[in-house]
Image (spheres, rainbow, N blue to C red):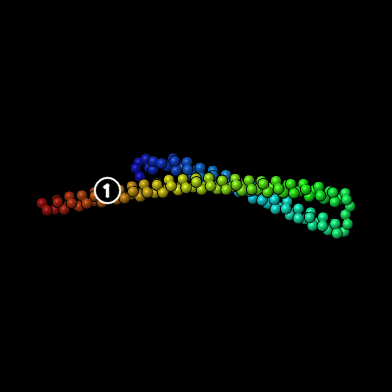
Amino acid sequence: MTKKGFELDQVLNFRKEVEKMRKIDFAAAKQEFEGASALLMREEEAMNQLTHELADKQREGISAVELQLYADFSRKKTVDIRQHRQAVISLERKMAEKRETLLDAAKDKKVLEAFKERKISAYMRGMAETERHFLDEISVQKAGHGKR
């Protein structure tokens, strides 16, 4: 553009860095959510296996002590699963917030990039217009010298 270039390059570079940081934050939140979801699925699967094991034991015959152990363990697993579900819901919200923050940062960067493109395009049109006027002036001067 001019000798100093696009005046808002520092702002654009800052917005690119902000977007990069938001991508990292979002990726970390997504990874944390996916890890918690996988843990929840494993816990639920373990609970299903426990339920099936208890049903099999009851068909075969089970002592009251074993039944009490299974019941206590089952209650603990149920509480754990409930806590994991809450954690997954919380992490999902956090991930959605990080996604929105990332989208906002990307929009801010895009706006500035579009502005830069418009400024460059306007500058190039202005330069082409100036060159065209200069060439027209040279043509007029040459034509004027030849008629004398």
User: Which percent across, then down, holds residue 105?
Assistant: 49, 45
Given residues 141 and 77, the one toward you in this image is 77
Could you say where residue 120 lies in the image, as x and y percent from the top left? Answer: 36, 48
User: In the depicted view, which residue is nearer to us: 52 or 111?
Assistant: 52
Of 4 and 141, nearer the camera is: 4
Q: Give the residue number, with chain letter if any, for mark 1.
A: 130
Tally of marks: 1
Confirm whether residue 40 shows in the render. yes
Instruction: Tell me the quarter of the image containing the N terminus.
Output: top left
The local crowd at label 1, few if under 14, some if 14 to 19, many if 20 or more residues have their Cα within 10 Å, is few
Using residue 21 as the reference point, say whether residue 44 is left or right of it: right
Outermost residue on the left side: it is 148
Q: What residue type is labelled 1?
A: Thr
Q: Decide if residue 64 is on the left or right side of residue 121.
A: right
- x, y percentage for residue 99? 55, 48
Residue 135 in picture, x, y percent from top left: 23, 51
- Regarding residue 35, the answer to whether it shows in the image is no
Q: Residue at x 37, y 40 (%)?
A: 4
Determine the residue positioned at 24% across, 49% down: 134
Element carrying mark 1: helix
- Which residue appears at 12% of the width and 53% of the height? 147
Q: Residue at point 79% right, 54% down?
A: 50
Say above or below: 42 vs 25.
Answer: below
Relative horizontal placement of residue 79, taking residue 8 as reference (left or right)? right
